[in-house]
């Protein structure tokens, strides 16, 4: 008599193999501290307020610092929706830090009536405010996330083994 494997048991087996493959993929000889730094950088850079730039920054950092490229890009892509949500708060924070008054580009109607040169100038100013706001928060965010993720990742047995070998 053959044993029937229902959809839930097949899903459980697939989840177990995905889980073990993900653990092997993530650690790849990295210590929990190094993986935590990789993920923290990916999360933070993924919130960079200029759309399209974080992927390139993550790739350059991963290659330059010899970090886990798939892990940093995965963290970057996970926070991509947050990047879009945080653009306006970063612009406001940067504007507040520079003590800028309200700009003509703060409302959509004002943008529609500008010349291309004025539009480019206003948008580049807003982007500069957003990048400044992001820079102020990025370093503390990386430090805090690295510390927290290191504590969490040390509790995962598959990741604790490379640290014991170092």
Image: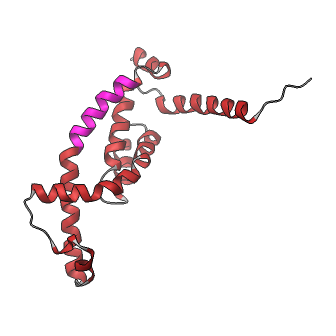
Number of numbered discs: 0
Q: Nearer the viewer, residue 133 or 20?
A: 133
What residue sits 39% from the left and 31% below the top?
35
Q: Is residue 65 above or below residue 152?
A: below
In which quadrant will I find the C terminus?
A: top left
Specify the quadrant of the image occupied by residue 115: bottom left
> Is 36 placed above or below 115 here?
above
Q: Please tell me which residue is depicted at 41% across the width and 42% down the height of the picture.
A: 72
Of residues 11 and 31, which is closer to you in this image?
11
Quadrant (top left/top right/bottom left/bottom right) for the N terminus: top right
Magenta span has 106?
no
- Tell me if I can see residue 60 in this picture: yes
> Is 38 placed above or below 124 here?
above
Point out the stretch of residues depicted in magenta: 138-152
Q: Position of residue 7 (x, y in %)?
A: 74, 36
Colour scheme of the rendered structure: secondary structure
Judged left or right of residue 154, residue 92 is left
Q: Is residue 109 above or below residue 134?
A: below
Q: Is residue 64 visible?
A: no
Residue 141 image position (x, y, % from top left):
25, 39
x then y, percent, for residue 13: 68, 29
Q: Is residue 148 left or right of residue 118?
A: right
Residue 58 picture location, percent across and down: 36, 47
Residue at point 35% right, 60% down? 51
Q: Is residue 12 left or right of residue 166?
A: right
- Which residue lies most toward the right here? 1
**Within the image, what quadrant is residue 24 found in?**
top right
Closer to us: 106 or 143: 106
């Amino acid at each position: 008599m053959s044993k029937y494997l229902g959809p839930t048991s097949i899903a459980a087996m697939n989840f177990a193999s995905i889980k073990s493959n993900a653990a092997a993929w993530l650690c790849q000889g990295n210590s929990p501290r190094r993986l935590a730094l990789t993920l923290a950088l990916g999360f933070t850079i993924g919130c960079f307020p200029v759309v399209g730039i974080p992927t390139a920054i993550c790739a350059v950092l991963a290659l330059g610092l010899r970090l886990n490229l798939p892990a940093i890009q995965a963290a970057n892509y996970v926070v991509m929706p947050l990047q879009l949500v945080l653009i306006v708060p970063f612009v406001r924070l940067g504007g507040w830090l520079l003590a800028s008054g309200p700009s003509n580009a703060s409302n959509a109607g004002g943008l529609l009536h500008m010349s291309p040169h004025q539009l480019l100038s206003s948008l580049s100013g807003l982007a500069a405010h957003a990048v400044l706001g992001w820079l102020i928060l990025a370093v503390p965010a990386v430090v805090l996330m690295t510390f927290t993720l290191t504590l969490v990742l040390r509790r995962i047995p598959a990741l604790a083994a490379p640290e014991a070998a170092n």
